[in-house]
Amino acid sequence: QSVLTQPPSASGTPGQRVTISCSGSRANIGSNSVYWYQQLPGTAPKLLIYADDQRPSGVPDRFSASKSGTSASLAISGLRSEDEADYYCAAWDDGLTASYVFGSGTKVTVL
Amino acid sequence: QITLKESGPTLVKPTQTLTLTCTFSKFSLSTSGVGVGWIRQPPGKALEWLALIYWDDDQRYSPSLKSRLTITKDTSKNQVVLRMTNMNPVDTATYFCAHRIPYNDAFDVWGQGIMVTVSS
């Protein structure tokens, strides 16, 4: 089981807004930055968000993220067919041994 | 632009040791703040972080796999090597290496990945 919990799936029609949650604990999201990655089918993951809510250059502003306490969320507004992918949150976990942890992943389907 | 590419065997037998090499370009692992990590993904499953090596040779490992992993770097060759001992069929996965943004824990550039199957 992943340390960071995400819903297995989310969906929306083109143009809609979809939100993905990522639930953690004080040891990870509660005390460290959150990152979001997008993985299109058959490809390597791509960095979407770093430092909780920052977009790397080239990432459309349709993607936004936020964090509150021990939870984080990624929002995709103006959903497009090319957004159909798996999305993963990630963070460092300051447990007994510090480690980088990924969420369980959310499959976004564009209906 | 930064690139990374994984290489190594695509088929290993149970109990063998896997050695994967990540060859990168357009950055140096001797630059302050830089790191290279390894992440794997079993077929149809989630990403799993394995290890990370920093410019100063600090190494971090997944607690659950620490006893089986060794990550090293060769700055002159622009390579990072991951060794995983005692391979098991459950280790069948695509293995990715990725560049860590200096002084930031985001992996901003990833290799294409290499699919490793563990089978006798």
Image (cartoon, rainbow, N blue to C red):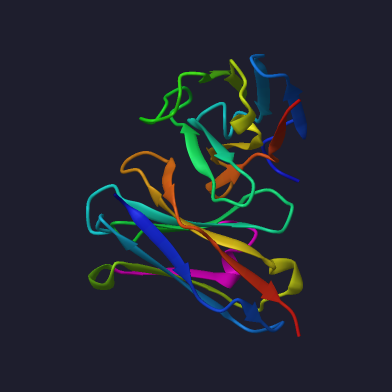
**Figure check: A72 above or below A39:** above
Residue at point 72%, 51% (across, down):
B45
> What's the residue at 71%, 43% (across, down)?
A2
Residue A47: x and y, percent?
47, 38
Quarter of the rendering occupied by the C terminus of chain A: top right
B27 w.r.t. B101: above or below: below
Q: Is residue A16 above or below residue B97?
A: above
The image quarter in which residue B27 lies: bottom left
* Magenta part of the chain: B61-74
Does the stretch in magenta take in B43? no
Q: Position of residue A107 (x, y in %)?
A: 72, 36
Of the pair B10 and A102, the residue shown nearer to us: B10
Left or right of residue B31: residue B65: right
Residue B11 occupies which quadrant of the picture? bottom right
**B114 or B80, which is in the foreground?**
B114
Determine the residue positioned at 25% across, 55% down. B26
Seen from the viewer's position, the closer of residues A64 and A102 is A64
Marks counted in the figure total 0
Q: Position of residue A85 (x, y in %)?
A: 65, 37
Residue B67, magenta (yes or no):
yes
In x, y percent, where is residue A90?
Answer: 56, 38
Q: Residue at x 34, y 69 (%)?
A: B79
Front residue (pair B97, B35): B97
